[in-house]
């Protein structure tokens, strides 16, 4: 056997000794939770568990230390850190990145919580790895945020019976219309329809809304946060010529609605009718 042949065989043997077949394993990323499309109501106690795992595709070979990146969540949606479970991963998923140890299997699961202002609509979460030989990114099924609101309306006149011509007939009856968003979600596009019946001699002379604009027919409120109440003050002038009448000043079926709903729980408190009366007083002077 020639010397050159022996040298070539020795070099080949040394190559296989010092060069491993695979230093790190390829990874497989899986979205384990939720298992199917799911929905949650903004501002409610609803939670959705989200979980991802990353594993080595070669038994006995680790993935190497690296990071798992998570796509951004919609506004008002966040991970509840107190609910999180980590196995060979660490970090704050709200920051969008988790550290993965040099292991064969890593996993995390956290509950999503939904604030009252969470943006309505579907979204997914995508997890991608920057491991040396990372597998394709994984994506959860759709998670849909819903908005539900229960709008309530109340109204009162002060005084409930106005004397025609009192205070010179100027600004002598004040109505206060109050709307409340009982939640659980923030409301958008809130409006209040105010059908008035005003007898002769009664005119609307001023209004002051806490929010939005009012044209004596429609109060265009806009957004109303969950748990918030807003007032609209309407001033009526009852002239001395106005006739006495009972329940003749009327706010008929005033209705508050929103882009989400007007009366989510069906208790009909988003509609109201309020009435007020007019009296007359005449002062007589007797001359001897």
Image: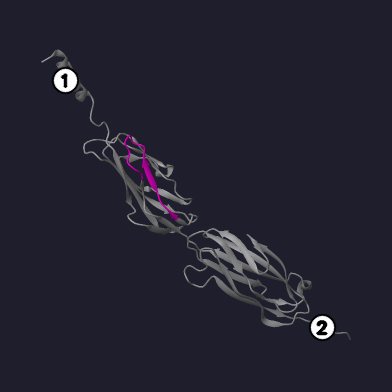
User: Which residue sits at x=21%, y=36%?
Assistant: 60
User: According to the image, label 1 marks what residue?
Assistant: 9
- Circle 2 packing at 10 Å, graded few (<14), some (14-19), many (20+), is few
> What residue range appears in magenta?
122-137
Residue 127 placement, left or right of 206: left
How would you classify the magenta stretch by its main secondary structure?
A: loop
CB-based contact (under 8 Å), mark 1 and mark 2: no
Residue 5 picture location, percent across and down: 15, 17
Residue 169 picture location, percent across and down: 77, 73
**As displayed, is residue 168 above or below residue 213?**
below
- Circle 1 packing at 10 Å, graded few (<14), some (14-19), many (20+), is few
Q: Is residue 123 magenta?
A: yes
**As displayed, is residue 105 above or below residue 272?**
above
**As displayed, is residue 7 above or below residue 107?**
above
Residue 116 placement, left or right of 86: right
Label number found at residue 65: none
User: According to the image, label 2 marks what residue?
Assistant: 284
User: Looking at the rendering, in which quadrant would you find the N terminus?
Assistant: top left
User: Which residue sits at x=42%, y=42%?
Assistant: 96
């Amino acid at each position: 056997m020639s010397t050159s042949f022996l040298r070539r065989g020795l070099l080949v043997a040394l190559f296989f000794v010092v060069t491993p077949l695979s230093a790190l394993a390829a990874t497989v990323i899986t979205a384990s939770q939720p298992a199917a499309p799911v929905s949650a109501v903004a501002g409610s106690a609803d939670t959705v568990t989200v979980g991802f795992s990353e594993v080595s595709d070669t038994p006995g070979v680790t993935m190497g230390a690296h990071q798992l990146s998570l796509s951004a969540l919609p506004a008002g949606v966040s991970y509840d850190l107190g609910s999180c479970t980590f196995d060979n991963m660490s970090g704050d998923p709200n920051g969008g990145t988790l550290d993965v140890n040099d292991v064969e299997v890593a996993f995390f699961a956290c509950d999503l919580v939904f604030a009252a202002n969470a943006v309505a609509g579907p979204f997914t979460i995508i997890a991608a790895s920057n491991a040396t030989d990372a597998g394709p990114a994984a994506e959860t099924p759709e998670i849909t945020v819903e908005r539900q609101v229960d709008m309530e309306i109340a109204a009162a006149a002060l005084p409930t019976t106005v004397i025609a011509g009192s205070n010179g007939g100027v600004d002598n009856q004040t109505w206060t219309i109050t709307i409340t968003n009982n939640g659980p979600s923030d409301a958008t596009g809130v409006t209040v329809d105010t059908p008035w019946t005003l007898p002769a001699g009664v005119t609307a002379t001023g209004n002051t809304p806490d929010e939005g604009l009012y044209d004596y027919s429609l109060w265009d409120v806009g957004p109303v946060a969950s748990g918030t109440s807003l007032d609209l003050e309407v001033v009526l002038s009852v002239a001395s010529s106005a006739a006495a009448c009972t329940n003749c000043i009327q706010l008929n079926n005033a209705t508050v609605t929103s882009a989400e709903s007007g009366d989510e729980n069906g208790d009909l408190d988003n509609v109201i009718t309020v009435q007020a009366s007019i009296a007359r007083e005449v002062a007589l002077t007797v001359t001897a």
